[in-house]
Image (tube, rainbow, N blue to C red):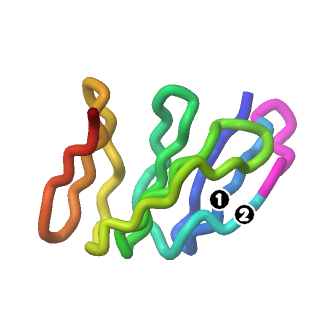
């Protein structure tokens, strides 16, 4: 019943779908062109500077992690077979166990 998004300026929002009411608006990162991705109850957003922010899909913002890759990106995070895949300008990252 909630919609999560991060706009191009890096501001995240949680919106209640049934009413259209904004539940929260918070800074997630820097400028971003990526889509927010959901996996196992967590949302992933990566900004153009390569910082990936992981936060809970919940009515209150709870940041789980911020991980800086140190490389620019304009791609969305991809989750596949338990791996987190991130394409930057220089590399294709595969992060997993």
Name the element at disc 1. Answer: strand
The x and y percentages for residue 62 are 70, 48
Distance between mark 1 and mark 2 Cα atoms: 5 Å
> Is residue 73 inside the magenta stretch?
no
Reading the image, the residue beneath label 2 is 26
- Highlighted magenta segment, given as a residue range: 17-24
**Circle 2 sits in a helix, a strand or a loop, which is it?**
strand
At horizontal 29% and vertical 68% (from top left) the residue drawn is 73
Q: Is residue 95 left or right of residue 54?
A: left
Name the residue rendered at 65%, 59% in the picture. Answer: 12
How many discs appear? 2
Classify residue 10 by image quadrant. bottom right
The local crowd at label 2, few if under 14, some if 14 to 19, many if 20 or more residues have their Cα within 10 Å, is few
Nearest the viewer among 48 and 69 is: 69
- Quarter containing the N terminus: top right
Q: Position of residue 78 (x, y in %)?
A: 31, 41
- Was residue 20 drawn as part of the magenta stretch in this picture? yes
**Residue 12: assigned label:** 1
Residue at 30%, 58% (x, y): give it: 75
Give the left or right position of residue 24, taking residue 93 as reference.
Answer: right
Left or right: residue 67 compared with residue 86: right
Residue density around tag 1, few if under 14, some if 14–19, many if 20 or more, within 10 Å: some
Give the image location of residue 81, x and y in percent: 26, 24
Residue 32: image tag: none
Q: Do tag 1 and tag 2 residues touch (Cβ < 8 Å)?
A: yes
Per the picture, the main secondary structure of the magenta-coloured stretch is: loop
- The foreground one among 84 and 18 is 84
Q: Quadrant of the C terminus?
A: top left
Expressed as whole percent of the image width and height from the top left, the position of residue 63 reads 63, 52
Which residue does the image show at 38% across and 72% down from the upper left?
48
First along the sequence among labels 1 and 2: 1
């Amino acid at each position: 019943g909630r919609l999560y998004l991060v706009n191009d300026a890096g501001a995240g929002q949680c919106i209640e779908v049934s009413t259209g009411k904004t539940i929260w608006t918070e800074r997630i990162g820097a400028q971003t062109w990526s889509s927010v991705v959901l996996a196992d109850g967590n949302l992933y957003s990566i900004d153009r500077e390569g910082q990936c922010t992981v936060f809970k899909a919940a009515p209150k913002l709870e940041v789980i992690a911020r991980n800086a890759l140190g490389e620019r990106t304009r791609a969305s995070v991809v989750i596949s077979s338990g791996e987190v895949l991130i394409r930057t300008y220089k590399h294709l990252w595969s992060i997993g166990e």
